[in-house]
Amino acid sequence: MGKLIGYARVSTRAQDADRQITDLLGAGVRRDDLYTDQGVSGARASRPGFDKALEALQAGDTLVITTLDRLGRSTANMLDLSKALRERQIGLRVLNLGGGDVDTGTPMGSMVFTVMAALAQMELEIKRERITDSVSKRRAAGKDLGGRRERFTNSQIDNARRLIDAGQPATQVARDLGMSRATLYRRIAGIEAQDWIATQG
């Protein structure tokens, strides 16, 4: 009987993998056979924890993940990985795929995995198309695309400057306005320059 090797990943440092780890342990993965990546995107080819998990796998073992997107972002990459594991005689088990537990070691599991991987990729592409379409329509209508036009009046920036002068953290003031601290300082500097020019006239 081969080992169960578990892998968990979260994309940002602010997230935690506790839920994934709990599910993997519940599926029979030993804590010593559990690998994680914290703050690592699924789009990255190299993931330290994932690389170690792959190294630990031997013929007859099974890689266990909670959801399909832990493997990566593209269908091609997910299918390539599934094929590579199969060639090494390693199984792949997805705990929450299509509402159930899918093991690619079975013909049905392999088929479901392929279909779900394609659907996951399609969903990502549809989201991208919607964003692109929305930007195109807004540009054609001459609307604000967010960040390209000045969305705040000089009066609002003046108020922000007063808050900072009164001791409010600049980062928090900028966040409340929905802009970066650098952008806020740039706007403040621009207003101060305009004020200075006006006094020279």
Image (cartoon, rainbow, N blue to C red):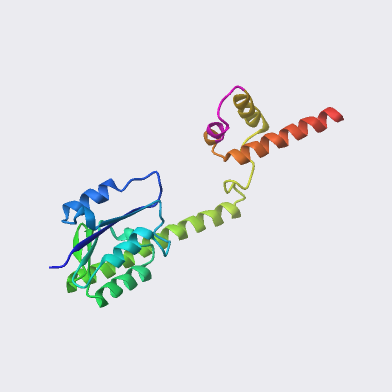
Q: Which quadrant of the rendered structure holds the C terminus?
A: top right
Question: In this view, which residue lies farthest toward the right?
Answer: 201
Measured as percent of width and height from the top left, residue 13 is found at 40, 46
- Does the magenta run of residues contain 94? no
Residue at the (42%, 61%) spot, across then down:
43
Q: Nearer the viewer, residue 101 or 5?
A: 5
Question: Which residue is the extreme one toward the top?
Answer: 166
Q: Residue at 62%, 50% (x, y): give it.
A: 142
Taking depth in this image into account, of 117 and 58 the one nearest to the observer is: 58
Can residue 118 be seen here?
Answer: yes
Q: Is residue 11 left or right of residue 111?
A: right
* Residue 161 x, y percent position in the rendering: 64, 28
Nearer to me, 143 or 68: 68
**Image position of 134 with respect to 125: above or below:** above
Q: Residue at x 38, y 66 (%)?
A: 74
Most distant residue in the left direction: 1
Magenta-span inclusion, residue 169? yes
- Up the image or down, 23 lies above or below 200; here it is below
Report whether residue 98 is seen. no
Q: Which residues are magenta?
A: 166-174
